[in-house]
Amino acid sequence: MTDTKPGNRFETPGRGSSTAPHDGRSETRRPMGDRGSRGRTTIADGVVEKIAGMAARDVDGVHAMGSGMARTFGAMRDRVPGGSKSASRGVSAEVGDVQSALDLEIVVEYGVAIADVAASVRENVINAVERMTGLEVVEVNIAVSDVKLPEEEDEDEESGRTRVQ
């Protein structure tokens, strides 16, 4: 809708469209008030889990998310045609109206300082979830379930998938 006339264009049922004047005259308008009072926004647990999972994976030293069994099933699911990697693997969220609590299960790379990686994951997850959802993150619990050793094969190789070189 491109219109060169000044004013706001709007549709009136049964009358077509018209343009509201911007001449400073008094118009009947709804009071702006607090925009939050005009409706309710709910955020599903899965949304927060995906955001937290992506934020945790961005931290150096995090090799994977989830326990060994969850990663095994996830690797199998990823190979199914049409399947995709689960961004929320290894993340559990409890979401309320204004607060959220998260539990993460991570696998770290061998040689990293686990306490430092956990602190970085916690900070990154809190920043991402609070920025994107507006929820207050009250806690982020991190369980380190495994360490990825340099000589260990990745999940693709463990499942018998051949690598082309």
Image (cartoon, rainbow, N blue to C red):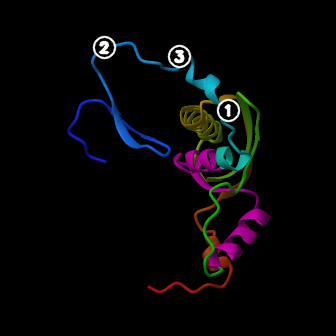
The image shows a total of numbered marks equal to 3
Mark whose residue sits in front, 3 or 2: 2
| Residue drawn 66% across the image and 44% down it | 48
Tell me if residue 122 comes above or below residue 31 in the rendering. below
Q: Nearer the viewer, residue 152 or 6?
A: 6
Q: Residue furthest front?
A: 15
User: Visible in this render: residue 163?
Assistant: yes
Q: Mark 1 or mark 2: which comes first in sequence?
A: 2
Q: Which mark is residue 24?
A: 2
The amino acid marked with disc number 2 is Gly
Overall secondary structure of the magenta section: helix
Q: Mark 3 or mark 1: which comes first in sequence?
A: 3
> What residue does disc 1 label?
40
The amino acid marked with disc number 3 is Pro
| Residue drawn 30% across the image and 30% down it | 7
The amino acid marked with disc number 1 is Arg
| Residue drawn 66% across the image and 85% down it | 160
Distance from disc 1 to disc 2, alpha carbons, whole Å, reads 33 Å
Task: Choose top left, top right, bottom left or bottom right for residue 122.
Answer: top right
Q: Nearer the viewer, residue 133 or 151?
A: 133
Q: Are marks 3 and 2 in contact (CB under 8 Å)?
A: no
Query: How many C-alpha atoms fall within 10 Å of the one at disc 1: few (<14), some, or many (≥20)?
Result: few
Image position of 155 (left or right of 4): right
> What residue does disc 3 label?
31
Distance from disc 3 to disc 2, alpha carbons, whole Å, reads 16 Å
Mark whose residue sits in front, 3 or 1: 3
Query: How many C-alpha atoms fall within 10 Å of the one at disc 2: few (<14), some, or many (≥20)?
Result: few
Q: Which residues are magenta?
A: 50-79
